[in-house]
């Protein structure tokens, strides 16, 4: 296993890893969907038209189903939420594997590597990219498993900070709206509120970008640990990842923001396609339902690919910084050893 | 879908009614548009008032005269006067002390409101009588001051008209329910001393201002001059006949005949849009920045004015003012007064959720079911709110189709279906037809008065047909224009126009908590075997061996139960294994029916009321059954959608 040169990290070289992530997500989504599906099947499954009645315009049966004061509603809601949280944690493993697959390859390259391919600190050049073979899935998964704790900690930290930022934003927006309503009127005050909320949203997104950079650094460090057959404590890995992410952000946050925003825009466009498909096919079954499933899964696959593409970019941004920091750390360690020997 | 008649089932027609094909009783009568419609109301009380607003103190000084005619058959020795604003005077008013939640007006006003009558005199030509000197403002120890009794120095004979002079002062409350102020925005309703409505027998329909109750009054002419600071824009009931600015004051005179209330609004921030629609001058008054709302409200009126005109008779007034209150004064929204309605909706408009349209149509509908058909709103609230909710849902469906309330993210919800679901949970709690103050909670009031009534009427429309419903409601609206109908008038109209069965359903559902639940109880079918043995047929003897096998035919039955007290015709759909679907009508007169089946394949499933006509059906989840050994359609759509959404959520929270 060997690291891929920073400028040669591309999601398009790792279709298998993207497909693996997609199928992992699909598999867990099926688990998450099971309680709702079981509930719908129990109530409406025996109807000759099945749950098509829930999509009849007017929504009478849909309202009846959701408004039935059925104990199942509470159970289904709670179970689904728990499954989503568990799934969010479990998905850290395939996510770690995906990032590991982007950051590392096997030594037997598909094409001869150029001079800088063996080091993450390589500078970009004009030669065609040397493609390293993808890691074997088991190898990538091992790195994913090793990255589980620091990635989960980053997930928790990132979620908590995002929620905090958005909550503060909501409070600030409400306060500012209230303060300017008399002078600006309801509608303009509401626009001001939206702008304030959007600013905090951007702040939360910016923090999310830093967390993604930290994720990239964390997985990359676990990859190096695997190469060196050492292990690093999760907490330390996470802290070093955050440090690398912060340094990277300081040096090139604009580039990261641009890369992230572009992919978000495409992701939203994909969601719009999914929405139009839902709207078009409605509650039809048979071939229409199959087509809808294909379109929806295409949307999800596209979004997973976008995520992989973004993480590839995050890796290429964070790798030089991380390597420099590691070099400095090694030098410091060497100096410390020399000092102690003296 | 293959639909065919089930006439092949022997004796079936004799067993079953002909629900959908029946001739509507009364259907040969005149169309609703032929029903004579009064051009004017009988004039009982005329108000000539002048009101001066102080927007800084939030007070209104009023004075003027009231000409009242005793239109009853009895001499009257005492008048009754509503002083509605005193509902907000203290926590001892009937309004404030009602332990009612779950509806509007449940918060205490930040500033109390009062109406103080300074003078009420009657000059009968010989003497100036000070009527207010003998007023009975309270009853016993009750501190409510919204329902004043005013003894007269002599009886007023039937047909006699008296002239009263009145002077009063309002202190407007901060907006708590329909009326009051919010900053410089003023919504001024229930603001003047208002005579209670006199009934034919000489009694007055007087009542304290009830928390859930609304109003009731006689028709007359209102000639009101409003005096506000120049910077304020006024919206008010009635046509502006004079408008001028004098010494920094804007003075507008509004005159309107054939109405039974007067409300107005004044705000120095109103924006205005005007458009003549179907001959009616529509004005939208709205806060700055609400141009989008105003456009949607105008679009609603472009549909609603001609639609309601065709259904319930032409809107008779030359103007209509729509007031969109500021977001900080939502309690002023969603209310109706003659020729003036208040709408509502927050700053943000969601496309795909037609709340603004729904509220606007609802409030406009009150121009008919309240304004022109002036039933007693406190005593029989379903007659205005309920009928109007039906009219609102009917209009929304006619305008925007079945997904008329929500059409967003693949979710489709109709207004009627929303009413049906809301009402379903309260069907056994209380009667629909009862006074507003008899309801235990605001929630049950809302669900039964608004939604249950709308669902009852929508069920009748779907069961007996659009044409019959239009004819019936059209006849009711025209016959009782400028009248004060009571529930009996409504039920009799349905009996006459739609038939006794429909009338009975309406009466039971309104007065006796009538309910209904169809259920497919059991379903069975089997292959018809060729009978074995010796048979003498056509002069020949033949022996059929046993186990000759299937005849290729199937027979069976479906057992459908009707629980509840209402009897409504319905269809039952039988679905064969080969996909054939057959509709069988049932008149619903008995508690259950066993519908025979005969076909060329086994019976797979049955659905009662497949077109969802009976919205009153209490449990639609038991409206179908699948035969043993067969499976239904399952829930693949739910699985597909929930999997997709789960993937999106997972992707969002765990990148």
Image (tube, grey):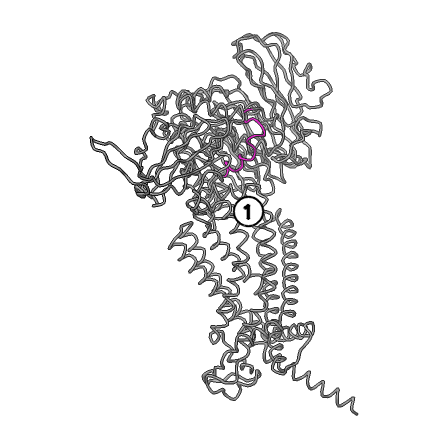
Q: How many marks?
A: 1
Q: Is residue B140 left or right of residue A31?
A: right
Q: Position of residue B447 (x, y in %)?
A: 55, 33
- The correct choice, above or below, for B606 with respect to B27 in the image is below
Q: Is residue A310 left or right of residue B277?
A: right
In this view, the residue in front, A292 or B243, is A292
Q: Chain of mark 1?
A: B
Q: Residue furthest left?
A: B539
In this view, the residue in front, B553 or B356, is B553
- Neighbor class of circle 1 (other Cα within 10 Å; few <14, some 14-19, many 20+) is some
Asked whether B291 falls inside the magenta stretch, the response is no
Q: Position of residue B113 (x, y in %)?
A: 67, 31
In this view, the residue in front, A209 or A231, is A231
- The correct choice, above or below, for B38 with respect to A123 in the image is above
Does residue B302 appear in the picture of this structure? no
Residue at image coords 51%, 25% = B510
Q: Position of residue B60 (x, y in %)?
A: 63, 30
In this view, the residue in front, B162 or A9, is A9
- The correct choice, above or below, for B256 with respect to B275 in the image is above
Does residue B242 appear in the picture of this structure? yes
- The correct choice, above or below, for A61 with respect to A301 in the image is above
Residue at image coords 53%, 55% = A33
Asked whether B420 falls inside the magenta stretch, the response is yes
Quadrant (top left/top right/bottom left/bottom right) for the C terminus of chain A: bottom right
Q: Which residue is mark 1?
A: B347
Quadrant (top left/top right/bottom left/bottom right) for the N terminus of chain A: bottom right
* Helix, strand or loop under label 1: loop
Region in magenta: B418-433
């Amino acid at each position: 296993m060997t690291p891929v040169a920073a400028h040669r990290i591309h999601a398009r070289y790792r279709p298998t890893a993207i497909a693996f992530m997609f199928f992992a997500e699909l598999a867990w989504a099926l688990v998450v969907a099971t309680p709702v599906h079981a509930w719908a099947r129990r109530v409406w499954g025996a109807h000759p038209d099945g749950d098509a009645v829930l999509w009849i315009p007017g929504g009478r049966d849909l309202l009846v189903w959701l408004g039935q004061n059925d104990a199942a509603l509470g159970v289904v809601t709670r179970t689904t939420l728990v499954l989503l949280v568990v799934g969010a944690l479990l998905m850290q493993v395939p996510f770690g594997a995906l990032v590991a697959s982007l950051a590392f390859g096997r030594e037997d390259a598909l094409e001869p590597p150029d001079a800088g391919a063996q080091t993450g600190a390589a500078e970009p050049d004009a030669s065609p990219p040397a493609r390293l073979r993808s890691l074997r899935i088991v190898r990538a998964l091992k790195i994913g498993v090793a990255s589980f704790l620091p990635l989960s900690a980053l997930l928790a930290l990132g979620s908590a900070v995002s929620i905090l930022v958005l909550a503060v934003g909501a409070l600030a927006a409400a306060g500012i709206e209230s303060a300017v309503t008399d002078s600006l009127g309801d509608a303009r005050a509401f626009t001001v509120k939206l702008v304030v909320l959007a600013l905090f949203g951007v702040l939360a997104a910016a923090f999310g970008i830093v967390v993604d950079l930290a994720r990239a650094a964390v997985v990359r460090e676990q990859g190096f640990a695997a190469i060196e057959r050492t292990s690093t404590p999760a907490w330390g890995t996470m802290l070093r990842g955050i440090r690398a992410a912060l340094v990277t952000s300081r040096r090139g946050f604009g580039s990261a923001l641009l890369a992230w925003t572009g992919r978000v825009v495409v992701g939203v466009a994909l969601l719009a396609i999914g929405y139009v498909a839902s709207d078009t096919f409605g509650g039809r079954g048979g071939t229409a339902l199959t087509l809808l499933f294909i379109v929806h899964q295409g949307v999800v696959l596209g979004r997973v690919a976008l995520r992989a593409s973004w993480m590839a970019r995050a890796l290429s941004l964070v790798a030089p910084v991380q390597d420099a920091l590691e070099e400095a750390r090694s030098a410091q360690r060497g100096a410390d050893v020399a000092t102690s020997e003296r | 879908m293959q639909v065919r008649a089930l006439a092949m089932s022997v004796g079936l027609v004799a067993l079953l009614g002909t629900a959908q094909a029946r001739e509507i009783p009364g259907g040969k009568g005149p169309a609703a548009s032929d029903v004579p419609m009064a051009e004017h109301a009988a004039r009982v009380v005329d108000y000539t008032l002048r009101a001066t607003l102080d927007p800084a103190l939030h007070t209104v000084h009023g004075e003027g005269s009231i000409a009242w005619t005793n239109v009853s058959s009895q001499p009257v020795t005492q008048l009754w006067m509503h002083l509605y604003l005193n509902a907000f005077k203290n926590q001892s008013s009937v309004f404030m002390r009602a332990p009612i939640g779950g509806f509007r007006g449940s918060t205490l006003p930040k500033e109390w409101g009062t109406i103080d009558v300074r003078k009420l005199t009657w000059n009968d030509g010989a003497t100036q009588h000070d009527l207010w000197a003998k007023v009975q403002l309270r009853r016993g120890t009750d501190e409510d001051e919204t329902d004043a009794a005013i003894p007269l120095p002599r009886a007023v004979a039937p047909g006699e008209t008296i002239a009263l002079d009145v002077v009063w002062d309002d202190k407007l409350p901060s907006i708590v329910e329909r009326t009051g102020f919010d900053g410089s925005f003023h919504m001024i309703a229930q603001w003047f001393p208002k005579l209670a409505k006199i009934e034919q027998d000489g009694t007055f329909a007087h009542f304290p201002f009830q928390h859930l109750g609304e109003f009731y009054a006689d028709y007359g002419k209102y000639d009101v001059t409003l005096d506000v600071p120049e910077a304020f824009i006024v919206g008010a009931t009635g046509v502006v006949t004079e408008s001028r600015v004098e010494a920094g004051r804007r003075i507008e005179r509004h005159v309107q005949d054939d109405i039974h209330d007067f409300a107005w609004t004044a705000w120095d921030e109103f924006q205005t849009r005007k458009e003549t629609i179907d001959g009616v001058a529509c004005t939208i008054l709205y806060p700055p920045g609400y141009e989008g709302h105003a456009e949607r409200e105008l679009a609603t009126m472009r549909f609603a004015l001609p639609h309601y005109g065709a259904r319930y008779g032409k809107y008779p007034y030359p103007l209509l003012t729509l007031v969109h209150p500021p977001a900080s004064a939502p309690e002023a929204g969603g209310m109706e007064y003659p020729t003036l309605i208040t709408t509502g909706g927050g700053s943000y408009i969601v496309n795909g959720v037609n709340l603004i349209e729904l509220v606007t149509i609802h409030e406009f509908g009150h121009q008919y079911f309240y304004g022109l058909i002036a039933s007693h709103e406190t005593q029989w609230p379903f007659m205005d709110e309920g009928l109007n909710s039906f009219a609102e849902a009917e209009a929304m469906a006619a305008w925007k189709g079945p997904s008329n309330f929500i059409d967003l993210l693949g979710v489709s919800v109709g207004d009627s279906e929303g009413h049906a679901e809301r009402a379903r949970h309260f069907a056994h709690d209380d009667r629909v037809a009862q006074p507003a103050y008899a309801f235990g909670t605001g929630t049950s009031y809302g669900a039964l008065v608004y939604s249950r009534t709308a669902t009852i009427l929508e069920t009748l429309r779907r069961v007996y047909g659009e044409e019959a419903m239009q004819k019936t409601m059209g006849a009711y609206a025209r016959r009782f224009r400028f009248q004060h109908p009571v529930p009996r008038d409504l039920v009799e109209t349905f009996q006459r126009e739609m038939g006794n069965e429909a009338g009975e359903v309406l009466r039971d559902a309104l007065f006796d908590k009538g309910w209904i639940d169809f259920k497919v109880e059991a379903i069975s079918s089997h292959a018809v075997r060729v009978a074995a043995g010796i048979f003498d047929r056509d002069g020949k003897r033949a022996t059929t061996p046993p186990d000759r096998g299937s005849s290729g035919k199937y027979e069976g039955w479906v057992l459908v139960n009707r629980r509840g007290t209402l009897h409504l015709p319905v269809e039952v759909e039988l679905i064969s294994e080969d996909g054939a679907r057959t509709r069988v009508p049932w008149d619903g007169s008995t508690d259950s029916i066993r519908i025979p089946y005969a076909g060329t394949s086994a019976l797979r499933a049955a659905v009662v009321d497949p077109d969802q006509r009976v919205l009153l059906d209490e449990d639609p989840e038991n409206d179908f059954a699948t035969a043993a050994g067969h499976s239904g359609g399952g829930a693949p759509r739910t699985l597909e959608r929930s999997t997709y959404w789960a993937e999106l959520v997972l992707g969002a929270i765990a990148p």
